[in-house]
Amino acid sequence: MLAQKTGDMKDLDGKAIVSNLEAQIQILISAMNQYLDENTLLATSAQSEALEQSLQSQARQLADLMMALQLQKTMVSLELQSDIKAFLKHCPRKYRHCGWRTINIRFSGGSIVPLSIAYYARNCDQKKKGKGIYPALVLMGIHDRCTSGLVSEVSMTSAALCSLDEAREVLKGRGIKLNIKTIRNIVKRFSSRARLLQKHDDTVFKVDTETIKNRLVVVSVDGGRIRIRETKRGPKTKKGRSRFKTDWREPKLFIIYIVNDKGRQDKIFAPYIDGTMDGPDALFSMLAYYLKKINVSAADKLLFIADGALWIWDRIKALFSALRLDPSKCYELLDFYHAVEHLSSIANMKRQWTEKQRRAWVKKNRKRLKQGQSELVINVIKDICKGTQNKLLKRERAYFIKNRLRLSYLTAGELMMPIGSGAIESSIRRVVNLRLKGPCIFWNEDSANEMLMLRCYYKAGRWGMLNTWATLPVVL
């Protein structure tokens, strides 16, 4: 049954739809059986490709029709009607049954099939288009008149590829023909539902609490750069468009992972990666929520490792205090490779040194840091900066002095802890730089937040969690 235009669509009886669907399924099955009966041999690669595409297309259509048939049967089941009554009791507004309506539903194989669905509305909204709801669709995880499988595939494809244009072309190759606006709306609402229900679902996080127990948990935080589009005040362009500015903003991310007995990231635990455009306080609030959910207090040790950004370290004590963690189990570490970069900056500012002397000085003090001689390194830096008026040298000296308690690389090595923040650096590149950042790429802030979440969960290998949240019953 092909989709009908909304304006021409008549409300069909559910039994008639079931009969039509069953008839179409039988026709497709008969058509596919003919390939077996004919037993035609393939002569060329072109014939092989054409047959494969034809079979795949019919298989997708058959799967969609079978799914539509099961949905239509479910819509009239007594069990679902009972669930609808329970759902409506928890709605903030009072809705009443206003009959059955035929609406088009998109399926993951690309088909659009009309189904008969019970429609509910308030008394004052019965004549207003779009004011009512279809509780049956909400309970079945069908939002935006798309099945949950289709919504998940569209959202994941949009997060995985570099643009919505690419996502549209890939989906088109799978038989799913959607325009950019529809894809954008599906992705936006998928992310919004997932974020809304994330804090109200405890079942998903319970899986990981035993994995955390008596393990070394590592947390790392960093920021990237993307351009946010903001409308400018003033006259519009000759074409009637609003003028805008595209300032650089910093999306902030964190990663949570566990380390095995060799000091490497344990692959049995998929990391948690998430981020926000709402600033450092929002990020640390989000981080505290995740650490509570995975019961980080059960971990043997917690290592927080990052670069020297003050917005990070100024909030660490408050984070540990809010989580009520044992101070003896908590470790802070400055990323070793950032520390070495700052050593190189100091050496490069010594103009009287030769290039060989600079390399030797950096190598010597790098070795001292690894051997636990951080105080000696700081004293050497103080001697170099003694009497200097160079503000850059003074800044480098202050960098090491402020982080002197976070230079315990020897202890970290003995405890098989990582000494670098490569995990979060890699996350910034994969999540932000390869998807949200690029020439002539501008984002609205809310869209950036939504894509940031999708990309984080996709790259962390936790898409199933997002899909669970996004298909829970909720009316936006």
Image (cartoon, grey):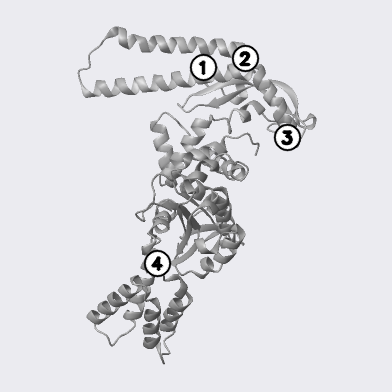
- In three-dimensional space, the C-alpha distance between marks 2 and 1, rounded to whole angstroms, equals 13 Å
Kind of element beneath mark 4 = helix
Q: Residue at x 65, y 19 (%)?
A: 79
Which residue was labeled with disc 2? 14
Residue in the foreground of this view, choosing between 347 and 438: 347
Residue 411, label in figure: 4
**Amino acid at pointer 3:** Cys
Residue at disc 2, secondary structure: helix
Three-letter residue code for mark 1: Met
Q: Give the foreground label among 1 and 4.
A: 4
- Determine the secondary structure under disc 1: loop
Of labels 3 and 4, the one closer to you = 4
* Residue at 46%, 47% in the rendered image: 455
462 versus 17 height, above or below:
below
Q: Within the image, what quadrant is residue 297 found in? A: bottom right
Left or right of 125, for residue 384: left
Q: Amino acid at mark 2?
A: Gly
Whole-Å distance between the Cαs marked 1 and 4? 69 Å
How packed is label 1: few (under 14 Cα within 10 Å), some, or many (20 or more)? some
Label 1 vs 4, first from the N-terminus: 1
Instruction: Specify few, some or many for label 2: CA neighbours under 10 Å numbering under 14, 14-19, or 20 or more.
Output: some
Taking the view exactly as shown, the residue that stands out farthest to the left is: 43
Q: Is residue 176 visible?
A: yes
Eye-nearest disc, 2 or 1: 2
In the depicted structure, whether residue 125 falls above or below residue 79: below
Mark 4 residue crowding within 10 angstroms, few (<14) / some (14–19) / many (20+): few
